[in-house]
Image (spheres, rainbow, N blue to C red):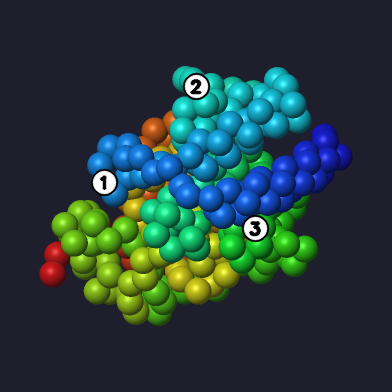
Amino acid sequence: MAQDWQQLNEQVTALLKTAREQVLAKMQSPLTVDEKTNRKDLVTNVDKSNEQFLIEQIHQIDPAARVLGEEGFGDTLQDLDGRVWIVDPIDGTMNFVKQRDNFAMMIGIYQDGVGQLGYIYDVMQDVLYHGGPALGGVFAGERRLKAPANIALADGLIGASGPLVVHDISHMQAIVHASAGMRVYGSAGIELINIMLGKTLGYISYLKPWDIAAGKVLLEALGCQVTTIDGQPLNMLSSNLVLVATEKAQRDILQIEEDDVSL
């Protein structure tokens, strides 16, 4: 089985490299941009075409697997039985449209509900963060990453969803106040990379399965906690208010939630 996972990893890495080349080529042409739920929830022709390409290739690589994709070109899932791939073709679409930077492609591979491989590709920096239990570690390109320092909330920066803080959802203002400061990157993938690199100690946001599937595999393999805001396990087939953090920072944040702290 170990050899099967290694071969699969090589195939996914090659697939994502090809997908990156296609995305960069399409960025040279005008984008077709549509709203999904509102003017800040965007989808482009590149999101759609990239998901179609990825899912088509995944079915060739792993014919028995099922695929859940953000833009709806995959399968309809009621469970995570067998092998399930969870795909985000362009994470950080607003950044993709407005900045042409700070966006990622993400794939999480789960076997009977257990995350085995995760991939977050920082497209513009051309760095693929990948690994998980099936590879015995997490890598940035060929470089093995060390676990980020297990620091407390007061000692580091926290990534956060801006609207959660503005509207003080789940005591977000108290959490940010207790930290060394807040950072907002506008892409779950980029946020999660910053945790892996030890630049931030956590991230809190409403996330859908494709936003967190890859990151959950990678961050847990590096010793971080990935739960709901109240410390419960994630339902990987639904939206959650997700807390990703070092163990110490998670304890601090859960204490703020329990104490019902507000500013």
Pointer 2 or 1: first along the chain: 1
Task: Quickly name the residue at label 3.
Answer: 129
Q: Give residue 257's position: percent from left, percent from top.
A: 24, 57
Vertical position of residue 209 compared to residue 64: above or below: below
Q: Is residue 99 visible?
A: yes
- What residue does disc 1 label? 39
How crowded pointer 3 is (Cα within 10 Å; few <14, some 14-19, many 20+) is rated as many
Q: Is mark 2 on a helix, strand or loop?
A: loop
In this rendering, is residue 166 above or below 237? Answer: below
Task: Give whichever of discs 2 and 3 has the lower sequence position.
Answer: 2
Q: Select label 3 or label 1 by which is in front.
A: 1
Q: In which quarter of the image is the N terminus?
A: top right
Assess disc 1: are there few (<14), some (14-19) or many (≥20) residues with their C-alpha within 10 Å of its C-alpha: few
Rate crowding at label 2 as few (under 14), some (14 to 19) or many (20 or more) other CA atoms within 10 Å.
few
- For this orientation, the residue located farthest to the left is 263
Residue 204, picture quadrant: bottom left
Q: Which of marks 2 and 1 is in front?
A: 1
Residue sitting at x 72%, y 46%: 18
Q: Which of marks 3 and 1 is nearer the N terminus?
A: 1
Residue 63: percent from left, percent from top:
72, 22
Q: Tell me the CA gap for discs 2 and 3.
A: 26 Å
Q: Residue at x 65, y 47 (%)?
A: 22
Q: Position of residue 64 (x, y in %)?
A: 70, 20
View extreme (right): residue: 3
Type of residue at label 3?
Tyr
Q: Mark 2 points at which residue?
A: 77
* Residue 240 showing in the rendered view: no
Residue located at (54% from left, 25% from top): 74
Q: Position of residue 149 (x, y in %)?
A: 55, 73
Question: Disc 1 on helix, strand or loop?
Answer: loop
Which quadrant: the C terminus?
Answer: bottom left
